[in-house]
Image: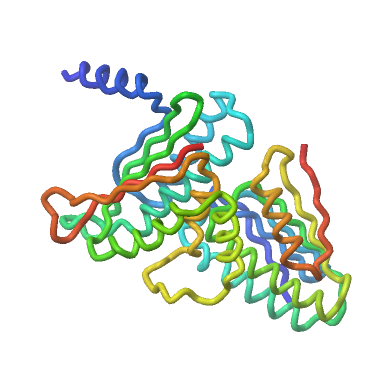
């Protein structure tokens, strides 16, 4: 599986999915005009990659600082894929959830993610 | 020259606590440029992180809503238009967005917002979470979003969101004006 690297723009995040080492990172802001169109190919590749894995440990670094409602919904689908994988392979997915100490929106979403995707190991990282 | 017009406009805007105002053509590029400008203004006002983020988020949800659903005026095929105001009154920010909608979509919008207006803060949060997890494709084929936009606005607004729909003068049979307000 080829790694994905997409540099950040004003309204789309940096996507750095190193499938070769199972280190997946996203940072920046996400409010593209058509979020589904932007993220669909990335989700598809992630899905295909997960199918090919068999118990390899995955580290996901979520470092976004702003994302709109459409992007939020898409990230939930992404976490669902990771949760399914972790259900089949317990303790194999670590989600590093970065949030600014003043950002209660991303903090609260992190709490929801933690409750809704119980197979994923959740690690909150506070950015001062 | 009509320099007086600028003075009148500016004085009126200042008196009403207007921080940011735009009215005109909407595109994603225009939105990106406005976003940069608004972020800088909020920083200059030394706005605390959490609130400034909510003002920004509300701004984006509203203006992208206008971009997605405004039908384009009748005389210009696909040119989207909208207006947005960010202001501050009695230590609260208000964000008001206005755009045309197709008259036939009026009921659909009312059906989406009216139930939210009846909800408590907890119920809004619950509805938001339910919709977030709802990965079924919505029956609503007109929606281009995630069904989360109004709930996101309502969740962040410290007062109930408000809206109004009025006839668009000159286009009464085809278009309505949609106004939406949130308070942060």
Q: Nearer the viewer, residue B154 or B11?
A: B154
On screen, residue B83 above or below B130: above
Q: In the displayed structure, does residue A18 sit left or right of residue B23?
A: right
Q: Where does the image place residue B152, in percent across and percent down from the top left?
A: 52, 52
Q: Which residue is pictured at 61% across the width and 61% down the height?
A: B129
Q: How is the image coloured?
A: rainbow
Q: Nearer the viewer, residue A86 or B124?
A: B124
Q: In the displayed structure, does residue A111 sit left or right of residue B135?
A: right
Q: Where does the image place residue B130, in percent across and percent down from the top left?
A: 59, 65
Q: In the displayed structure, does residue A88 sit left or right of residue B117?
A: right
On screen, residue B1 above or below B74: above
Q: Which residue is pictured at 35% across the width and 47% down the height?
A: B163
The reply to whether residue A30 is in sight is no
Q: In the displayed structure, does residue B131 sit left or right of residue A120?
A: left
Q: Where does the image place residue A107, in percent across and percent down from the top left?
A: 71, 48
Q: Which residue is pictured at 54% across the width and 45% down the height?
A: B156
Q: Quadrant of residue B173?
A: bottom left
The image quadrant where one finds the N terminus of chain B is: top left
The reply to whether residue A78 is in sight is yes
Q: Which residue is pictured at 64% across the width and 49% down the height?
A: A28
């Amino acid at each position: 599986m080829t790694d994905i690297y997409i540099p950040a723009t004003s309204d789309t995040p940096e996507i750095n999915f190193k499938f070769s080492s199972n280190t997946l990172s996203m940072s920046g802001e996400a409010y593209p005009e058509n979020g589904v169109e932007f993220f669909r190919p990335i989700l598809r590749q992630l899905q295909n990659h997960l199918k090919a894995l068999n118990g390899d440990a995955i580290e996901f670094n979520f470092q976004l600082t702003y994302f709109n409602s459409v992007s939020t919904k898409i990230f939930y689908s992404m976490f669902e894929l990771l949760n399914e994988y972790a259900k089949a392979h317990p303790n194999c997915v670590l989600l590093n959830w970065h949030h600014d100490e003043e950002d209660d929106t991303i903090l609260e979403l992190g709490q929801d993610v933690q409750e809704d995707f119980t197979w994923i190991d959740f690690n909150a990282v506070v950015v001062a | 020259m009509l320099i007086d017009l600028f003075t009148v406009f500016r004085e009126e805007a200042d008196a009403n606590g207007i921080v940011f105002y735009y009215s005109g053509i909407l595109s994603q590029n225009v939105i990106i440029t406005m976003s940069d400008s608004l972020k800088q203004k909020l920083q200059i006002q030394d706005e605390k992180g959490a609130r400034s983020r909510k003002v920004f988020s509300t701004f984006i949800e509203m203006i992208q809503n206008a971009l997605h659903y405004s039908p384009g005026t009748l005389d210009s095929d696909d040119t989207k238009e909208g207006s947005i105001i960010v202001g501050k009154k009695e230590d609260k920010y208000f964000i008001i967005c206005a755009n045309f909608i197709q008259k036939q979509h009026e009921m659909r919008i009312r059906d989406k917002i009216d139930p939210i207006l009846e909800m408590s803060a907890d119920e809004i949060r619950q509805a938001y979470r339910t919709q977030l997890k709802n990965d079924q494709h919505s029956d609503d084929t007109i929606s281009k979003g995630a069904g989360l936009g109004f709930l996101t606005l309502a969740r962040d607004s410290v007062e109930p969101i408000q809206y109004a729909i009025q006839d668009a003068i000159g286009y009464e049979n085809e278009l309505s004006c949609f106004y939406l307000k949130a308070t942060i």
